[in-house]
Amino acid sequence: KAGVTQTPRYLIKTRGQQVTLSCSPISGHRSVSWYQQTPGQGLQFLFEYFSETQRNKGNFPGRFSGRQFSNSRSEMNVSTLELGDSALYLCASTGPVNEQFFGPGTRLTVL
Amino acid sequence: GIQVEQSPPDLILQEGANSTLRCNFSDSVNNLQWFHQNPWGQLINLFYIPSGTKQNGRLSATTVATERYSLLYISSSQTTDSGVYFCAVEQRDDKIIFGKGTRLHILP
């Protein structure tokens, strides 16, 4: 089985721009979760999607949004980028007993 | 929300040594997982262990849910074991909370 894929792997943006990240889960998995990892805050949960519906949400501002498509692929969008949004963004695919399998991440740098 | 504390924060060992990493959590959880993050940022799922003991090669894990802790054992450490080890718990509201990790350095 192919693993979780994330695109792009690296991204450089400037303040005020917006960005869209993509995640394709493991085939057959219907739940996708997104996390932000920074040196200061560690790994923080952003949101979870299941069958195209947001099922859970972390404590992030409304500039962070996401969606899931009928093929379970998910995108997350960050609008009006700030320097503090520089981070590794990780996507996880959820297995049948709720175990999580992570993609390689997208490293976002905001200048 | 639930607090997840991992100890020690940093650990430096010689190749071949054994180690025990600990994860304490402040409330009942639905499940618990251990991950290894390699130097390139990839998080590898090591164990899904809401309770009991599991073993996979040189690694094993034990979770005592009633006492709200989990242990990860690494035996005969190799340099490829270096990286950060995370414990993550699923709260009752299904949100996943990660600990801050244990950074392990294995010296050749």
Image (spheres, helix red, strand yellow):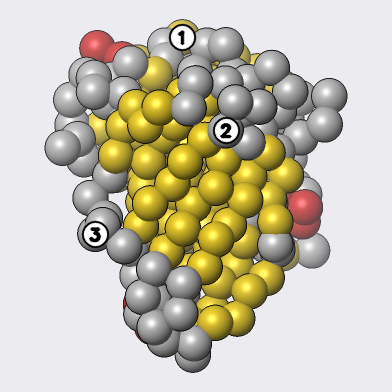
Q: The C terminus of chain B appears in which quarter of the rendering?
A: bottom right
Question: Residue drawn at (16%, 37%), measured in percent from left and top?
Answer: B1
* Kind of residue sitting beneath label 1: Gly
* Kind of residue sitting beneath label 2: Phe
Q: CA distance from mark 1 to mark 3?
A: 38 Å
Element marked by disc 1: strand
Question: Residue drawn at (23%, 50%), measured in percent from left and top?
Answer: A59
Residue B48 vs residue A34, the one in the foreground? A34
Q: Which residue is mark 3?
A: A61
Question: Residue drawn at (49%, 21%), measured in percent from left and top?
Answer: A51
On the image, the x and y values in percent for residue A38 come to 43, 66
* Kind of residue sitting beneath label 3: Pro
Residue B5 vs residue B18, the one in the foreground? B5
Q: Which residue is mark 1?
A: B52
Q: CA distance from mark 2 to mark 3?
A: 22 Å
Which chain is home to disc 2? A
Q: Which residue is mark 2?
A: A69
A101 displayed left or right of A19: right
